[in-house]
Amino acid sequence: VEIHDGRRSATGVPALERIVFFSDAVFAIAITLLAIDVRLPELSANQTNTTLLEELAKIRPAFFAFALSFGVIAAFWVGHYRTFRVVTRLDSRLITVNLVFLFFIAALPFPTSVLAGQGDVPVAEILYAIFGILTGAASTFLWLYVVRAGLVAPTVTPEIARFVTYRAIVVPIMFALSIPLAFLHPAVVWAWWIAIFPIQGLISRRYDVHHPAEDPDPPSIEA
Amino acid sequence: VEIHDGRRSATGVPALERIVFFSDAVFAIAITLLAIDVRLPELSANQTNTTLLEELAKIRPAFFAFALSFGVIAAFWVGHYRTFRVVTRLDSRLITVNLVFLFFIAALPFPTSVLAGQGDVPVAEILYAIFGILTGAASTFLWLYVVRAGLVAPTVTPEIARFVTYRAIVVPIMFALSIPLAFLHPAVVWAWWIAIFPIQGLISRRYDVHHPAEDPDPPSIEA
Amino acid sequence: VEIHDGRRSATGVPALERIVFFSDAVFAIAITLLAIDVRLPELSANQTNTTLLEELAKIRPAFFAFALSFGVIAAFWVGHYRTFRVVTRLDSRLITVNLVFLFFIAALPFPTSVLAGQGDVPVAEILYAIFGILTGAASTFLWLYVVRAGLVAPTVTPEIARFVTYRAIVVPIMFALSIPLAFLHPAVVWAWWIAIFPIQGLISRRYDVHHPAEDPDPPSIEA
Amino acid sequence: VEIHDGRRSATGVPALERIVFFSDAVFAIAITLLAIDVRLPELSANQTNTTLLEELAKIRPAFFAFALSFGVIAAFWVGHYRTFRVVTRLDSRLITVNLVFLFFIAALPFPTSVLAGQGDVPVAEILYAIFGILTGAASTFLWLYVVRAGLVAPTVTPEIARFVTYRAIVVPIMFALSIPLAFLHPAVVWAWWIAIFPIQGLISRRYDVHHPAEDPDPPSIEA
């Protein structure tokens, strides 16, 4: 696998830009399609305020599942955005690794819809956690690959690379640890998942204190 | 939170461009997905012109709800477009604030579908108004944030900033005031919502008279 | 309405580029969402080759409606692409006009779905023709606006402008003339609509013969 | 058909960039919409872990069909990406050829949904193979067109062009040969389809050995 400069292109559409663009489009579609499952069932026309409120209350779990997955995909997007800010070259394997990662992003609306409809059943939470593990692992692997293959800017020191790996790997680890919690109560596992956001934020902030100059806009799941 | 220049990027994909791009994709998908709820029910094959016209008449409210939300999302897009025309730097908090705003944009097809199906029930109008308030508040907050954090071009004087704030805050205020109207008649609350467009246009035009040179293409909900 | 240079932007995201980008995303989503209505009904698992072929034959009209609308939206995209190749400046009214045009593009999946399901009923053809007229009129108006407001490159002579207007206005005229044909037979009105593609191609080619140098890549519905 | 430089544009939105952009959006939407058909049927609320697992097992074929088509569209995207890396000029016929290719990409979710629901019926496999042949033929034709019309960079020697043609034409040939296999067993035809990926990879790698310098990032279906 030979390496080449991401900007070199005969057409004026730089190679890296096209990959980033295509990825962004997949992220944007997946994140927006989530809301398609937040829909009332077919209702007769003669609803009252009371019956409509009851129906809306019934689809509250679907709305929460949409909000959770919006946050999860947004966090992965921020990670992808920050990874590609320091990628300066690409090779054909990076394209494959990126497509595998996008496969899991595109698939996320499926476990989300299961969670929306059957959130009381532990199997629904476990399915969601499995997709979280796989997507998080793909995201971590993408970062490890660009570092190992030497595709990143020289400003990424081994220390910075290790720090970003820690922050990325937190996601699949947290999703893996959430699986036994699924048998306790849905609220417990949801709380655990939501905790991923501040934890990633904390890692980022701790890093900022020690290296304020090296990475002025450090990757963070909360931003 | 350290600030950095939006154009500085190792990869040739400027940071600000990627954020704007991702936002545009979310806007475009949300605005186009709205039409997916304007569909005839499953009909048998042997329809006549008369029965088909009757069925089309029944989904008129769904078409109007699509048209209304297309206008609302388009207006928010224009506001976003104008905000980012003067944003020159970004920090990680701006990315979070922008993602929260996009969450409400991506969610809008949901209250639109409720309005399409149950537009005669006040609760449907109130739900739509609540999402209008939240999206409008997020949009106003995004503007206030970039101004307070000093991320905008120096050409944005305090006076211009105040003017843009007024115009942005009109949207959540108008949606909030529409809630009591929902108990009168759907037509009243719809008229009120549609009035947001010319009111924003008026604010823009009044501003243009006093400051024709400072902002040659002033933000406006009508354009 | 003051005019400003499309490239001038504080952020590095040129104004014209963002509008073109947003428009392209709406076009791409509308054109791809069309296929969502080409679906088999829920079938039991024990189908044979014969019964599956019968079911596929039943949704042939849905596939043809998808193919027709793909062609129609693609033709409007080509027109938009060619218009914006010569647009050099923008004003806020152009943004409004463009959004109105995009409204009709985003709405096209609706009459397409009616045509897919009820193509034998003249009302379905008339509904499609009405949306064709409105979208074609918006497309023609967009071109007339950029020329009248002086937003195009000086290479666009009055003669070229008139020629492009002719080619654009053919679309709404052909859709208008198709309305009475809807009462004859679906095949007649479909043939008429498909004839729009070669007719636009003919106008383009005739123009090419007289002005080969002025517009090396003349707008054409067929390309 | 006159040729012109893809970068020449009055507006700052280069012609080639806009075509590539629009294509990427269509690819991204088609690839992400695939997952919309991986959904549980409407289930009552009182599911147990066992019944939910049974329901999930039932939609396994839908998930596999999504994964297969994700791979197929991703492979076509990589081919398109590599083709346009060497395209330096465009003419109006290229726009038409590209739109015809995108038509088949946008259509692929339809045979995928048939495969997902009726994968045991040979007709479902044959339908999928037919769309594979047509899309692969359009993809090969796109490459042949840009080479024949002289729209590619001079670095593309006749030998490189021939090699890329071989690799492109493998896809429709493999799909054509899979049609008789559909009458044996679904697993056979699926294995055959999946074999397309390593075969394309092999052709690429063999080429790399002989021409390491000429094409540092050779087109490959696996990357």
Image (cartoon, coloured by chain):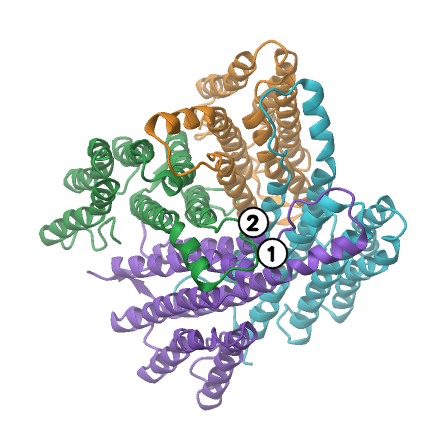
Chain colours: A purple, B cyan, C orange, D green
Vertical side of C11 occupied by D20: above or below: above
The answer to whether residue B9 is seen in the rendering is no
Tally the marks. Answer: 2
| Residue on which disc 2 sits | B29
Vertical side of C147 occupied by B113: above or below: below
Q: Secondary structure at mark 2?
A: helix
Chain of the residue under the numbered disc 1 shown in the image: B
Mark 2 Cα shell of 10 Å, populated few (<14), some (14-19), many (≥20): many
Residue lying at the far left of the rendered structure: D210
Q: Secondary structure at mark 1?
A: helix
Spatial CA span between label 1 and label 2: 8 Å
* Amino acid type for the residue under numbered disc 1: Ala
What x and y, as percent, mark residue C49? 33, 28
What x and y, as percent, mark residue A222? 53, 75
Numbered circle sitting on residue B37 = none
Q: Nearer the viewer, residue A140 or C97?
A: A140
Q: Nearer the viewer, residue A190 or B179?
A: A190
Dots 1 and 2 on the same chain? yes
Numbered circle sitting on residue B106 = 1
What x and y, as percent, mark residue D114? 39, 37
Quarter occupied by residue C133: top right
Chain of the residue under the numbered disc 2 shown in the image: B
Vertical side of D189 occupied by A131: above or below: below
What x and y, as percent, mark residue A181? 47, 77
Q: Is residue C51 left or right of residue B121?
A: left
Q: Is residue D157 left or right of residue C96?
A: left
Vertical side of B151 occupied by D194: above or below: above
| Residue at the spot 20% in from the left edge and 46% down from the top edge | D195
Q: Nearer the viewer, residue D206 or C61?
A: C61
| Residues at marks 1 and 2 touching, judged by CB atoms closer than 8 Å | yes
Q: Is residue D120 left or right of residue A39?
A: left
